[in-house]
Every structure is written in structure tokens, then in C-alpha cells.
Image (spheres, grey):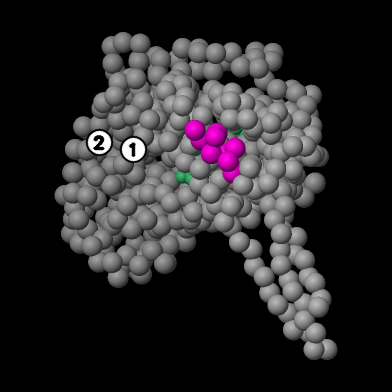
């Protein structure tokens, strides 16, 4: 339900309203952008790189000092298990600041000595400058992790930011503003506006003339809308979008480790990770044994209260998103799938029945052309299909408009390299999944995104390079 200028923040585990949030109108967004503009011209813009890096380490320290608050806020907003928020989301937020604080101090730029035809020389070197005010728009699945993944390098490069977190998960971005203050980040460097996309804070921000660049994580079709919005003012964009990721399991894999790995790749965060594997291809000699083992894993996942330390699976983010996921469960049946596990809504007999839970679900038997095999569902669900040859599985895995991530499971490393290099994606894992080194390029091809972030790639997106050529 949407009020005039407030909207409710709902706990997906039981449907309760945990806060009312002010929706930023055009004036409030403009105020935030102007504050960011003043700050980039002020003390922040004049800080030396080591001083800026030291402040970012202080932000990481302050996140760690309020670790439990961040975990509680993230769990209440998303319904994700407390164990997951404590192990992944909040530690990664601090790590994002530390990694980019260190990287900006050591990142080099190219230098060339140029010989000219008249026998003189020129020295070319580039300097890094901030872009200015960055609009940061983020989704609800890993709210703090994905927001800080963009804010940390943007600030490291000397920019200021206006962030618009998802309307579903406003809490941790707001808490981060308090932390910024504690860490001595000047006013106006980090600004938060809340609201929706179209005709709301998201659109006001992307269309704002005084925003120099937009970095966005979310659905591919939202990326398309933002591209149109920024076209008039030719703003640079970085897009991390949806995926329909393949996992390829060869018969020579380490069977138990692979079942564990695929279990995580399909069901982590209730399948609400852009990198999750919704298409699993298994070499025919182990297909039936593998499906049975994955079924056992899915049926043993503990679905329940996010506040219980033992819970593996929380709810989906919202009633609307649950309806979307359930519509794919119905579609899979209509398309002729064989149901191996799940397919419905769990019953608890308590307040969790008001939450937005679905069962972890596995299908087999669909043709590759089925919509359930082609479209991103973004829930705890996968389709498992057999394959007979490397060539066949590479073609199946690449037969998608998306191209974010893939994983390959084999004990033959030569094969691992060979197949990995044929994947038409931005990230391929071999015998692992979501194992992250923040210095590596991260992004997707096709509908999965534009550009790469991570390490030097983030620094290059969040800065302008000025090449200086001196004749001597
Ligand atoms: P979404 O695109 O619906 O929303 C993301 C953000 O964009 C929200 O803050 C929303 O308010 C805002 N928004 C929506 N319309 C807008 C508009 N017209 N102008 C400006 N802002 C607008 O995505 P979601 O449902 O929050 O997240 C799930 C999607 O995100 C999935 O498709 C998932 O694959 C993708 N995702 C991708 C990555 C990645 O790294 N590639 C990471 C996480 C999530
Ligand atoms: O680990 C990351 O840096 C990252 N951007 C993860 C994205 C996950 C998508 O849901």
C-alpha cells in the first residue's frame, strides 16, 4: 500500500509493518543532489588520497562497531536468515570499504614516452579525477552489500553520492548514513533518498541534470528504462542486471562437493542472488543419482524464522515477488515439467504463515525452449537437464539472452579451463560458486549488464582520466 508521501517497510517473514518511510519528491531529490554537489567542491573534493582512504577505513570500523544493528536491520527488511546476514552481507559491507580504500592508494595509471618524427619526445601520463555526483540505485536482495559495493569505490575516487535503495529495503542505507557521520565523512558526501522507480525518487535521480553518472543494480528491464532516462544528458552508466545462470556438472566431478555446491548455488538467500543457478546441466551417467541427491538436500533445508540461527531459508522479499515465483511454479507444470521437490508454500501454523515463503523447488523434463528455462525467476528453484557431450552443454548453457555467471564442476582441470573459456558470461566459477575476490572484474554480457565493476574496473568507472602530454 502506498500512502501520499510515506510508504510502509514490511517484514517479509510475517508481513508486519516495521517502519513508515518518507518518499522523496522531486524537490527532496534535488536537495540531495545539490548537497552532494557542494560536498564534491568542498572539503571532500580537496582531501588527499591517503586521507580519504583513512576515512573509508573508519567507515568500515564503524560498520563493524555496529555489526549487530546492521544485521538486525538487514534481517528485518529482507527476511534473510540471521546466519547469512552475519556471514555475508554485513562483513562484505565493511570489506567493500577496506578494499577500495587500499586500492585507491596503489592504483597506477599508464605512462608512455612518445617519440615524434622530428626527433623530440613527449611524455604522456594520466591523472584520475572524480566524476562528480554519482546516482546509486540498488535492489533488495543484498541491500547493504550491493550498495556499499558501489558507494565505496565512488567515494574512494573522490566523488559524492546520492543513493536510492530499493523501496523494499530502506533500513541499512539509512543506518549507513549514521555511520558515515560517526566516521567523520563530511555532510553531503553520502546522501540517501527513499522511494520507488518510475515517477518517483529513482526516476528523479537518474534524470537529474546535475548527476554525473548512474550506477545501477537490478532487473534488466529497469536498466533499459534508466538507459532511456540518462540518454538526453549522456551520463555514463554501469549496469549489473539479471541472469539465468547455468551450472554444468560433469560425471567426473567430486560428487558430494558438487551436490553441496549446487545446493548453495540454487538456494542461497532463497534463490534471490543474481548469480544463482536456475539451469543445472548434469552429464547423463550421473543424472539420476545427482537429481536424487539434490532433492534430498532441498528437502532437508530448514525453512523458517530468519531469527533462528539454524534457519537455511527465509521468505521471498514480498507478496508480489512470491506471486511472481508461484506463477513460474504453475507455468512449469503447464509446460510439462516433472516436479522433483517443493512446488508450493510451506505451512508453519504460526505467524510465519503471513510471511512470503515458498518451498525450495526442483524440476526436470522441460525442453530448453520452455519459458521456465529461459526467463529469470529469482526464487529458490532450478531446472535440471541431462547432457551427453561437452559441445552440447556449452551450446545449451550459452543459449540465453543473459550472460552473468556460470559454474563448472569437474575434476578434470583441463576441461574446466576449456569449458570456462567458452562461456558467454562475465564470471565463471570452476568447482566453486560466489567465491569473491573484490579486485576481480564483475559484470555481465547481453541482458546481464553493461561494464565491469570490481578492483581497478570500479576505479575506472568512478573517475575521469585526464591524459597529459608534455613535449620535451
Ligand atoms: P528492480 O530493477 O525492480 O529495482 C532495482 C532498483 O531500481 C530499486 O531501487 C527500484 O526502486 C529502482 N527502479 C525501478 N524502476 C526504476 C526506474 N524506472 N528508474 C530508476 N530507478 C528505478 O530490481 P529488484 O527487483 O530490486 O532486484 C532484483 C533484480 O536485480 C533481479 O533481476 C536480479 O537478477 C538483479 N540483480 C542483479 C545483480 C548483478 O550484480 N548483476 C545483483 C543483484 C540483483
Ligand atoms: O559480490 C558482489 O560484488 C556482487 N556484486 C554480487 C551480486 C550478487 C547479486 O545478487
Q: Which quadrant is home to the N terminus?
A: top right
Relative to 20, say whether 79 is above or below. Answer: below
Element type at mark 2: helix
> Which corner quadrant of the image does residue 221 belong to?
top right
Q: What stretch of residues is rendered in magenta?
A: 53-61
Q: Earlier in the sequence, mark 2 or mark 1?
A: 1
Kindly check if marks 2 and 1 are in contact, taking CB atoms under 8 A apart as contact: yes
Whole-percent x and y of residue 22? 65, 17
Whole-percent x and y of residue 239? 60, 47
Q: Residues within 10 Å of mark 2 (few under 14, many from 20)?
A: many
| Residue bearing mark 1 | 267
| Residue 467 relative to residue 443: left or right | right
| Residue lying at 72% horizontally and 52% vertically, measured from the top left | 129
Whole-percent x and y of residue 289? 16, 49
Indicate yes or no whether the magenta region holds residue 359.
no
| Residue bearing mark 2 | 298
| Residue lying at 74% horizontally and 42% vertically, measured from the top left | 45
Choose between 408 and 42: the one closer to the eye. 42
Q: Which quadrant is home to the C terminus?
A: bottom right
| Residue lying at 29% horizontally and 55% vertically, measured from the top left | 431
> Which corner quadrant of the image does residue 337 belong to?
top left
Whole-percent x and y of residue 391? 35, 68
Amino acid at each position: 500500500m502506498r500512502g501520499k508521501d510515506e510508504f510502509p517497510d514490511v517484514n517479509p517473514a510475517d508481513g508486519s509493518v516495521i517502519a513508515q518511510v518518507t518518499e522523496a519528491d522531486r524537490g527532496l531529490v534535488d536537495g540531495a543532489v545539490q548537497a552532494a554537489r557542494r560536498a564534491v567542491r568542498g572539503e571532500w573534493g580537496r582531501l588527499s588520497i591517503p586521507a580519504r582512504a583513512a576515512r573509508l577505513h573508519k567507515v568500515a570500523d564503524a560498520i563493524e562497531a555496529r555489526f549487530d544493528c546492521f544485521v538486525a536491520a538487514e534481517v528485518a527488511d529482507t527476511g534473510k536468515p540471521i546466519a547469512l546476514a552475519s556471514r555475508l552481507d554485513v562483513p562484505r559491507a565493511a570489506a567493500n570499504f577496506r578494499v577500495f580504500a587500499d586500492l585507491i592508494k596503489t592504483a597506477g595509471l599508464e605512462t608512455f614516452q612518445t617519440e615524434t618524427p622530428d626527433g623530440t619526445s613527449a611524455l604522456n601520463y594520466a591523472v584520475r579525477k572524480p566524476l562528480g555526483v554519482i546516482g546509486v540505485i540498488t535492489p533488495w536482495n543484498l541491500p547493504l552489500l550491493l550498495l556499499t559495493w558501489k558507494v565505496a569505490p565512488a567515494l574512494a575516487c573522490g566523488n559524492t553520492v546520492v543513493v536510492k535503495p530499493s523501496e523494499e529495503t530502506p533500513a541499512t542505507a539509512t543506518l549507513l548514513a549514521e555511520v558515515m557521520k560517526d566516521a567523520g565523512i563530511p555532510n553531503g558526501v553520502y546522501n540517501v533518498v527513499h522511494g520507488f522507480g518510475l515517477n518517483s525518487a529513482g526516476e528523479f535521480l537518474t534524470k537529474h541534470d546535475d548527476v554525473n553518472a548512474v550506477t545501477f543494480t537490478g532487473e534488466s528491464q529497469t536498466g533499459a528504462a534508466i538507459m532511456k532516462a540518462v540518454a538526453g544528458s549522456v551520463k555514463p552508466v554501469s549496469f549489473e542486471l539479471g541472469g539465468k545462470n547455468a551450472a554444468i556438472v560433469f560425471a567426473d566431478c567430486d560428487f558430494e562437493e558438487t551436490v553441496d555446491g549446487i545446493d548453495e548455488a540454487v538456494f542461497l538467500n532463497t534463490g534471490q542472488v543474481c548469480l544463482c543457478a536456475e539451469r543445472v546441466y548434469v552429464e547423463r551417467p550421473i543424472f539420476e543419482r545427482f537429481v536424487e541427491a539434490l532433492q534430498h538436500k532441498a528437502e532437508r533445508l530448514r525453512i523458517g524464522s530468519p531469527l533462528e540461527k539454524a534457519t537455511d531459508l527465509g521468505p521471498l522479499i514480498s507478496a508480489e515477488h512470491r506471486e511472481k515465483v508461484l506463477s513460474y511454479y504453475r507455468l512449469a507444470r503447464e509446460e510439462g515439467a516433472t516436479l522433483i521437490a517443493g512446488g508450493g508454500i510451506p505451512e508453519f501454523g504460526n505467524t510465519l504463515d503471513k510471511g512470503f515463503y515458498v518451498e525450495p523447488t526442483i524440476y526436470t523434463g522441460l525442453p530448453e525452449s520452455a519459458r521456465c528455462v529461459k526467463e529469470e525467476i529469482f526464487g529458490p528453484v532450478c531446472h535440471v537437464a541431462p547432457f551427453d557431450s561437452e559441445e552440447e552443454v556449452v551450446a545449451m548453457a550459452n543459449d540465453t539472452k543473459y550472460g552473468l555467471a556460470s559454474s563448472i564442476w569437474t575434476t578434470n582441470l583441463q576441461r574446466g579451463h576449456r569449458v570456462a573459456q567458452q562461456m558467454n558470461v562475465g564470471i565463471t566459477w570452476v568447482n566453486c560458486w560466489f567465491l569473491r575476490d573484490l579486485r576481480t572484474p564483475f559484470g555481465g554480457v547481453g541482458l546481464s549488464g553493461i561494464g565491469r565493476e570490481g578492483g581497478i574496473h570500479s576505479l575506472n568507472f568512478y573517475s575521469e582520466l585526464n591524459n597529459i602530454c608534455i613535449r620535451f
